[in-house]
């Protein structure tokens, strides 16, 4: 490895590393300026299309610059895949993830502090931990890579407040080189990323999003569920079906299975083992279609995905482009289709309207927060205090998401500071533990967990108490996932209340607690965000209805220069109407209406129906019980 203070490596040197470690003979043209800039140790913002090989763009600079390459990554599964890939190439790599045992986390931190260097992947919420900050300061960090960098920007489609702590790394490692990577960033978002990451004189490298092999289409259909089944019959090869909710992932997968397709669901509510099993089957090709939420796809290394379909309408064009761009990474023809029916449109409009809380909801959350903290108007807080988010939502009468967003907006306005809560599970008894011990209820598989909780905390005098979950799960011999499921079930039985770290937050008002009735967020905090969300949705509606090239329309969000029409989308290359010879061949001796409908493009079904009516009037065909028959003419 080359020390950071030597001359930047040449392209030939970087290509040698690429050949020796990754087995590729040369970089893609779009990667060359990114790896050269990253290896020089400056500030680099790379905006590359999905499937553009972004991981190479920080891994090779991180390797050749030596020391520790700190990678900020938003998903545990993504971190695990990257760690595994680097280790296969003989490169030191570790990841700090939530739920990890304290001893394992300390071992990883010690390796990063005292070891030979390598890659350390962390989630953004880890950065605000004082213990991590102290350990990080002692590391020889020479490169900092920020994956999915659009999450940094308040104007990004997937903003995450935890990413705001990234700027602290500048003071810890002022000489480190920075590489920020994203697939989708408008000019406004790109500028925001550079400002928030403190990038002085950054090298911004933008590669057009277009893939000449990816054909976009929108299909207006009477029923998207029936259209999905048709899509399954009309397509071949590895496919992804995106849906909005976990329930839809399950129901769509079941529907496809019922029609004989090799399909399975994938969403964050499944166990990790089930998700991994379905993903590995799909990657291996033994499973053709995954019906999934947006929890799937990021960092998945599968180049031969032929078809991406959306059975819902994404509100964000950037999110849609990322998901659609997971098809055809091998350069072979691929398709991204979006199904639109009346319920899908209504659902999207409803979802957009609920993206942000209204001022009344925010004031309600402020009042509920004040009540939970027992904090009077004008009172000061000496230190942060933990609150449970779910009761805030319940008392306000809003969703959990709206309660969280209300807190986030109040923090952005400078009213309060929010700090993540780590490790411990906050709990309380909902029934008298003494009675539960004397007359234990029949709770089935959860009995052992209830017994362990009573043994440890059955005589708690405090209303709320903290559970050492790692110790309890180890005592019971169960995994973290299984242990959390047992706790969730006991909570559903109204025996306990349990708030995971993700369901709690430590808050502190920065000055005197504001008056609820007069509290009003600045326009730049709330109204501008509502307007930004509406503008994104307006863009998506424009995409649905454009008469011009679909790829050209999507590109207009990012690129000021207009590229030529793609020539392969449904606007550039609409399907040809079937000829009467083709229709007769489809019918043969007989065919079901269902099968005939699958063969006919949606836009020409009325034309085919007219042809059939004409033939029936002529006595050439007849139909009965959902089947079209060819009538044999007398000789």
Image (cartoon, rainbow, N blue to C red):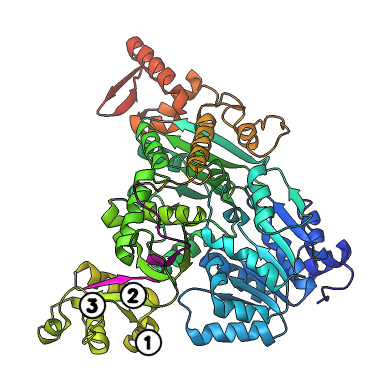
Q: Is residue 337 left or right of residue 346?
A: right
User: Judging from the image, what secondary structure is the residue with disc 1 in?
Assistant: helix
- Check if mark 3's residue and mark 2's residue have beta carbons within 8 Å: no
Q: Is residue 222 left or right of residue 559?
A: left
Of the residues tagged 3 and 2, which is closer to the observer?
A: 2
Residue 186 on image: x %, y %: 64, 43
Which residue does the image show at 30% across and 66% down from the upper left? 374
- The range drawn in magenta is 496-517
User: What residue is shown with label 3?
Assistant: 446
As drawn, 534 above or below 146: above
* Image mark for residue 471: 1
Quadrant assignment for the N terminus: bottom right
Looking at the image, can residue 351 be seen? yes
Q: Nearer the viewer, mark 3 or mark 1?
A: 1
**Mark whose residue sits in front, 1 or 2:** 2
Report if residue 331 lies within the magenta region.
Answer: no
Residue furthest toward the left? 439
Residue 53 spot, x, y in % from top left? 69, 57
Residue at the (70%, 43%) spot, across then down: 208
Q: Which is nearer the N-term, disc 1 or disc 2?
A: 2
Mark 3 lies on a secondary structure that is helix
Q: Which is more N-terminal, label 1 or label 3?
A: 3
Residue for point 57% across, 26% down: 574
Residue 504 is inside the magenta segment: yes
Residue in front for this viewpoint, 506 or 192: 506
For the residues marked 1 and 2, what is the alpha-carbon distance in whole angstroms? 15 Å
The local crowd at label 1, few if under 14, some if 14 to 19, many if 20 or more residues have their Cα within 10 Å, is: few
Return the residue at label 2: 426
Decide if residue 186 is in sight here: no
Q: Earlier in the sequence, mark 3 or mark 2?
A: 2
Gap in Å between the C-alphas at discs 3 and 2?
Answer: 19 Å
Question: Residue 165: x percent and y percent?
Answer: 58, 65
């Amino acid at each position: 490895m080359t020390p950071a203070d030597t001359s930047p490596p040449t392209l030939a040197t970087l290509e040698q590393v690429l050949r020796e470690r990754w087995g590729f003979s040369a970089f893609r043209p779009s990667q060359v300026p990114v790896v050269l800039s990253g290896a020089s140790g400056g500030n680099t913002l790379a905006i590359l299309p999905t499937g553009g090989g972004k991981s190479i763009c920080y891994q090779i600079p991180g390797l050749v610059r030596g020391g520790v390459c700190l990678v900020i990554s938003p998903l545990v599964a993504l971190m695990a895949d990257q760690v595994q890939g680097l280790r296969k190439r003989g490169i030191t790599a570790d990841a700090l993830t939530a739920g990890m045992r304290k001893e394992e986390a300390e071992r990883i931190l010690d390796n990063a502090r005292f070891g030979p260097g390598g890659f350390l992947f962390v989630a953004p919420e880890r950065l605000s931990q004082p213990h991590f900050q102290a350990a990080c300061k002692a590391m020889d960090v020479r490169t900092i890579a920020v994956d999915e960098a659009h999450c940094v920007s308040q104007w990004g489609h997937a903003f995450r407040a935890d990413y705001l702590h990234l700027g602290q790394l500048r003071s810890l490692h002022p000489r480190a080189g920075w590489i920020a990577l994203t697939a989708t960033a408008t000019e406004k978002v790109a500028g925001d990323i550079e400002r928030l990451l403190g990038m002085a004189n950054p090298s911004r490298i933008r590669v057009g999003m277009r893939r000449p092999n990816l054909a976009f289409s929108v299909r207006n259909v009477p029923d998207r569920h029936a259209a999905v089944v048709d899509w399954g019959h009309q397509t071949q090869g590895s496919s992804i079906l995106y849906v909005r909710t976990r329930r839809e992932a399950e129901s769509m997968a079941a529907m496809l299975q019922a029609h004989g397709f090799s399909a399975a669901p994938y969403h964050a509510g499944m166990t990790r083992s089930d998700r991994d099993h379905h993903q590995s089957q799909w990657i291996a090709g033994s499973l053709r279609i995954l019906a999934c939420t947006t929890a799937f796809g990021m960092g998945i290394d599968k180049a031969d995905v032929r078809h991406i379909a959306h059975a819902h309408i994404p509100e964000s064009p950037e999110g849609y482009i990322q998901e659609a761009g997971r098809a055809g990474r091998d350069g072979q023809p691929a398709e991204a289709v979006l199904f639109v029916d009346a319920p899908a449109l209504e659902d999207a409009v409803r979802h957009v309207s609920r993206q942000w809380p209204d001022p009344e909801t925010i004031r309600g959350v402020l009042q509920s927060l004040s009540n939970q903290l027992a904090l009077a108007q004008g009172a000061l807080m000496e230190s942060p205090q933990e609150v449970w988010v779910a009761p805030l939502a319940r008392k306000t009468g809003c969703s959990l998401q709206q309660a969280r967003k209300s807190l986030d907006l109040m923090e952005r306005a400078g009213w309060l500071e929010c700090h993540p809560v780590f490790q411990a599970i906050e709990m309380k008894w909902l029934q008298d533990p003494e009675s539960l011990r004397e007359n234990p209820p029949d709770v089935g598989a959860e009995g052992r967990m209830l017994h362990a909780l009573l043994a440890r905390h059955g005589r708690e005098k405090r209303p709320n108490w903290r559970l050492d979950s790692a110790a309890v799960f180890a005592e019971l011999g169960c995994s973290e996932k299984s242990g959390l499921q047992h706790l969730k079930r006991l909570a559903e039985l109204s025996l306990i209340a349990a708030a995971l770290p993700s369901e709690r937050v430590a808050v502190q008002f920065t000055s005197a607690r504001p008056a609820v009735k007069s509290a009003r967020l600045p326009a730049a905090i709330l109204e501008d965000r509502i307007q930004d969300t509406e503008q994104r949705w307006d863009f998506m509606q424009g995409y649905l209805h454009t008469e011009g090239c679909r790829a050209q329309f999507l590109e207009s969000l990012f690129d000021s220069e207009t590229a030529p029409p793609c020539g392969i989308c449904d606007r550039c290359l609409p399907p040809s109407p079937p000829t009467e010879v083709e229709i007769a061949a489809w019918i043969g001796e007989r065919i079901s209406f269902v099968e005939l409908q699958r063969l006919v493009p949606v836009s020409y079904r009325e034309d085919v129906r007219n042809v059939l009516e004409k033939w029936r009037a002529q006595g050439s065909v007849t139909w009965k019980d959902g089947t079209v028959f060819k009538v044999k003419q007398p000789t």
